Image (spheres, rainbow, N blue to C red):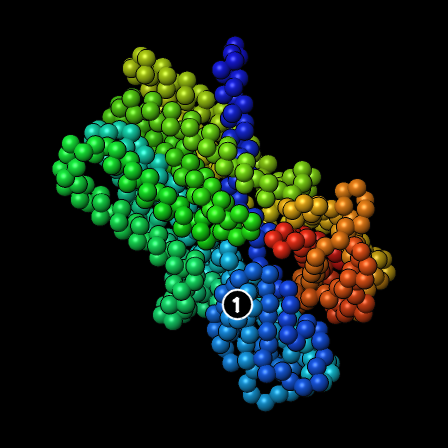
Amino acid sequence: MTITAPRLRLWALALVAGVGLLLGGAAPAAAHAVLTDTAPARGAVVAEPPTQVELVFSEAVSASGDGIRVLDPSGRRVDDGNPTAKGGGTYAVALSGPAARGTYTVTYQVESADSHPVAGAFTFSVGEPSATPVATTVRDPDAGWVGRFHAAARFGAYTGMIIMTGGALLLLLCGPHGEALPTVRRSTATAWALLCACTLALLLLRGAYLGPGHPADIVDVSRLAETVRTKPGALLVLRLAVLACCAVVWRYRDRLRRALSGRRPAFGGVLAAAVAGMALAWTWAGAEHASTGPLPYLSMPVDAVHLLAAGTWVGGLLVLAWALVRAGDGVPPGAVVRFSGVAFTSVCVLAVTGLYQSWRQVGTPSALVETPFGRLLLLKAAGVGLMLGLALMSRRWTRRLAEERDRAPLRALRRWVGAEAVVGLCVIAATTALVSTQPARTQAPAPAAGAGASAVVSLRPEFDTGGPGGRGFADIVVDPGRRGPNAVHVTLTGPDGDLLDAAEVLASLTSRTGSIGPLPVPVERVSEGHWTVSGFQLPVAGRWDLSLTVRTSEFDQATVKGSFEIP
């Protein structure tokens, strides 16, 4: 096959679009809120019992009545169950009941501004620490059947939005012939119903997902009211309202056509579809990572356009493949040709918007092969590359269909579009898996070998906060690396090996073996680029997971993780 200049340019654009789609399709975790300060301080010993406990987060959060719990040394809950927002990411909860001496445990599970749950725990003591602190485990919102149903509803809503966008586009491209294509109409209507059902499920499940996870929370009216008052809940309600308006417009489309007779009804239909699509896409962009961090008012529209472009290409492809299999010659060749041109434009839009978002998804090239997220991303990249290659072949047969208009090109087009649709479904599945996997930029690989019985633990994860001077390495040492008191040292260096200072360094440890933690590691800055703490207790042997957050400015931060074994 001769590679002409136009074909070479097409392959180059396909490659750029593939990179943009695969990097822009997953959500980053760098925008999550983190606990930056507490009163009483984490690990502090105070003489008198406090009247309230205060938690300060790095960004605005929301907390339900069970979002912050305070347990006394015996494990009894002593807070009033009414967390109060004090502004600036600060929440306070009052203490009630008789005060006891010993170690108090505070657990929190709140919702960050990007709609993701943030959970953790810390302790403080009154008088003196208890001999045996209360062992607590922080509930993983994604675990259990509530978490699984919530994940399935998110995938269903995303899939419904993609297919509905593509189906609506094909109906518009078919023009007057659209009413005569029941397969396209049924596919679009089914996607609308799926999106409605999954959105309603997300609204009902959210209280249980962010709360204790009890089944009764799904039908708890008070929790539903709390959900609706939050930004993500309000956007879910807005999504249902927009979907209801779409159903009303479709139900009375004939009357609207007659009312718009002679007033460019085709343009009105395109405009209405564009407004409805942008409003629906905004309900994702306004509640996810694009709504936080630097330049949110640029990131949100870019994210919305990215979702619509993906729906135009992938969703339209899925509906077209199904229509070609079921309807065959009923699909007007002119509509197929027009869709090919629109899909090509969508690929260009995906390239631009995806590349804009990609810099916040993967911190370094090495993370692509050294982390589960990176390896999954490479797998998705292979799928995207295959899909784009199939798209080029489909485009070739589309041109032949427009020129020859016989059954041979149509049969070939069915095969190529069908194969492209199957790969497209795999790409959607890979994207869903990426959403639930910790991004490569915030993840560091585990050390190659575990520490010996008396060996000092040494980790060296790479981080990138995304801001100027925010790249480097964190040398973490746990000495002597065994059960009992340990010194924890953190040294930050830049790519050139020079010491790198940071506005804040936060660390926590969680025991897999003993289900303890996360325990905050109160490292303090002792000199430029150095943070340390002495006498930190590791109460049990086994594998420990380390989480280290490095913040280099008000908006730029990254969290890296590692693990080690102690005897």
Q: Which residue is drawn at 32% across and 53% down?
A: 240
Left or right of 436? Residue 391 is: left
| Image position, residue 230 (x, y; %) | 43, 62
Q: Label 1, on which residue?
A: 87
Question: In front here: 39 or 462?
Answer: 39
Left or right of 369? Residue 312 is: left
Specify the quadrant of the image occupied by residue 261.
top left
- Whether residue 199 appears in this view of the structure is yes
Q: Is mark 1 on a helix, strand or loop?
A: strand
Q: Quadrant of the C terminus?
A: bottom right
| Image position, residue 260 (x, y; %) | 17, 37
| Image position, residue 280 (x, y; %) | 36, 47
- Whether residue 132 appears in this view of the structure is no
The answer to whether residue 546 is above or below residue 364 is below
Left or right of 312? Residue 28 is: right
Q: Which residue is drawn at 31% across and 50% down?
A: 242
| Image position, residue 315 (x, y; %) | 38, 36
The answer to whether residue 102 is above or below residue 337 is below
Question: In front here: 262 or 148?
Answer: 262
Q: Residues within 10 Å of mark 1 (few under 14, many from 20)?
A: few
Q: Residue at x 73, y 83 (%)?
A: 128
The answer to whether residue 536 is above or below residue 312 is below
Left or right of 413? Residue 117 is: right
In the rendered structure, which amino acid carries the disc numbered 1? Gly
Specify the quadrant of the image occupied by residue 401.
top left
